[in-house]
Image: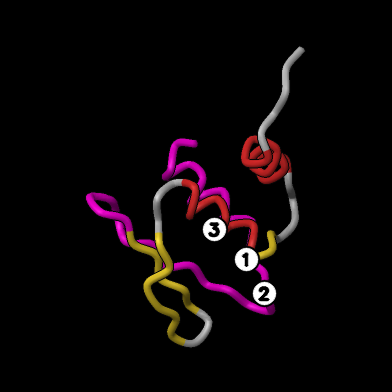
Amino acid sequence: MFYMSQMEKLLEKVRHSKTDLPFTDLEKILSHAGYTNVRQKGSHVHFRKPHAPFLTVPVHNGRVKIVYVKEIISLLSV
């Protein structure tokens, strides 16, 4: 029998999603990958991780467009 962790379930949900994702879900994924939220300027949230590219995520109405989410997931190679 195979059990999925909450993070695995969330990543699977994101991979198959065709709609925008709540920012809190993306924040969980980035946090799990070692990124920290370093600042927010307007609608753009900035994440940083040592020895990794700096990420800027546009957030509107608490959601992130799926195109940005998919790009971040592929960048993380998760």
Q: Residue at x 37, y 72 (%)?
A: 38
Secondary structure, mark 1, is helix
**Nearer to us: label 1 or label 3:** 1
Return the x and y of residue 40 as percentages of the image width and height. Answer: 44, 80
- Magenta segment, which residues? 49-78
Q: In this view, does 74 lie to the left or right of 38?
A: right
Q: Is residue 17 rendered to the left or right of residue 46? A: right
Image location (x, y in percent) of residue 3? 72, 23
Mark 2: which amino acid? Gly
Is 23 left or right of 71, judged from the image as shown? Answer: right
Q: Residue 21: x and y, percent?
A: 69, 59
Query: Alpha-carbon neighbours of circle 2 within 10 Å: few (<14), some, or many (≥20)?
Result: few
Q: Which of the two discs, 3 and 2, labels the residue nearer the N terminus?
A: 2
65 horizontally vs 17: left or right: left
The residue where tag 2 is placed is 62
Report the residue at 68% width, 40% height from top: 6
Relative to residue 40, is residue 14 depicted above or below?
above
Label 3 residue SS: helix
Determine the residue positioned at 56% across, 48% down: 70
Q: What element carries label 2?
A: loop
Give the x, y percent position of residue 1: 77, 12
- In this rendering, the answer to whether 78 lies above or below 65 is above
Q: Residue 68 carries which label?
A: 3
* Disc 2 to disc 1: CB gap under 8 Å: yes
Q: Nearer the viewer, residue 78 or 65?
A: 78
Quadrant in the rendering for residue 28? bottom right
The part of the image, by quadrant, that contains residue 16 is top right
* Amino acid type, residue under disc 3 in the picture: Tyr
Mark 3–mark 2 Cα distance, whole angstroms, equals 14 Å
Q: Mark 1 points at which residue?
A: 23
Mark 1, other Cα within 10 Å: few <14 / some 14–19 / many ≥20 = many
